């Protein structure tokens, strides 16, 4: 019964919390190639960013924000010990719209701070891995950033985003999808279908494969980083 004193009622409230991000390269004037990379489910930014050391060069800054929700990774029964590994998640299905809004604003803040610190207007590349793929796509569609390149590595373009919204929001962005031939979590066929979906939306989407599982591949990452991060005009 609406308004009943016996029924629980939800009361959203905004609060301030401390988040963190990690960098590779010099966060100083002179940056000409800016990367923001979103880790996968259960990862921490401090470990994830170490996988980008091979593409570090003068003038390139790599930024890895850490998802806002950290948790202990327990055993199959959910138990954890003193030395259990800690991971982070971008969102869950619980109160999902609020969590999406929170991380979009957070990532906008990270991007703005990095640009202010470095004084750079260099083109932006965004890479999402696994759960970070949905995070990266939603950020570009809902946030304040306009990347030149969007790399979607072994993850899911959000299914609840319409073709029209994808087409409008990703226009002019070079989109690269990546799939490992032996990925047991995100198959090559699944990623190929996502590419076809983006192409139908009018997006310039390329598909890259490598011989491996659910992970970043150093050689392919270096190849993607070797080209200029130039935003397409059409």
Image (spheres, rainbow, N blue to C red):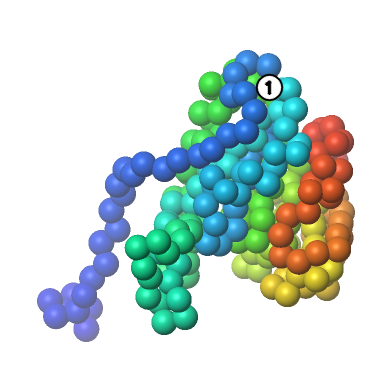
Q: Nearer the viewer, residue 186 or 93?
A: 186
Q: Is residue 107 left or right of residue 223?
A: left
On the image, the x and y values in percent for residue 47 come to 57, 48
Secondary element at image label 1 = loop
Quarter occupied by the N terminus: bottom left
Q: Residue at x 75, y 39 (%)?
A: 54
On the image, the x and y values in percent for residue 4 come to 16, 79
Outermost residue on the top side: it is 29
On the image, the x and y values in percent for residue 222 come to 82, 42
Q: Residues within 10 Å of mark 1 (few under 14, many from 20)?
A: many
Q: Nearer the viewer, residue 204 or 184?
A: 184
Where 117 falls versus 151 (above or below)?
A: above
Q: Residue tagged by mark 1? A: 31
Q: Nearer the viewer, residue 112 or 74?
A: 74
Q: Residue at x 12, y 76 (%)?
A: 5
Quarter occupied by the C terminus: top right
């Amino acid at each position: 019964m609406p308004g009943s004193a016996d029924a629980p009622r939800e009361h959203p409230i905004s609060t301030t919390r401390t988040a963190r991000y990690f960098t590779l390269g010099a966060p100083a004037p002179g940056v000409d190639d800016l990367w923001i990379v979103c880790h996968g489910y259960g990862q921490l930014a401090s470990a994830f960013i170490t996988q980008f050391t091979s593409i570090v060069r003068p003038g390139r800054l790599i930024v890895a924000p850490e998802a806002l929700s950290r948790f202990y990774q327990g055993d199959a029964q959910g138990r954890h010990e003193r030395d259990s590994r800690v991971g982070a998640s971008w969102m869950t299905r619980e109160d999902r719209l609020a969590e999406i809004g929170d991380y979009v604003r957070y990532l906008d803040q990270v991007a703005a701070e990095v640009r202010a610190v470095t004084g750079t207007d260099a083109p932006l590349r965004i890479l999402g891995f696994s759960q970070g793929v949905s995070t990266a796509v939603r950020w570009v569609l809902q946030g304040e950033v306009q990347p030149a390149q969007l790399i979607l590595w072994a993850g899911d373009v959000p299914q609840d985003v319409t073709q029209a919204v994808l087409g409008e929001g990703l226009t002019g962005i070079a989109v690269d999808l990546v799939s490992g031939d032996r990925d047991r979590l995100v198959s090559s066929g699944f990623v190929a279908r996502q590419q076809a979906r983006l192409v139908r939306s009018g997006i310039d989407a390329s598909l890259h494969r490598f011989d491996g599982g659910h992970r970043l591949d150093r050689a392919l990452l270096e190849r993607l980083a070797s080209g200029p991060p130039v935003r397409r005009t059409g």
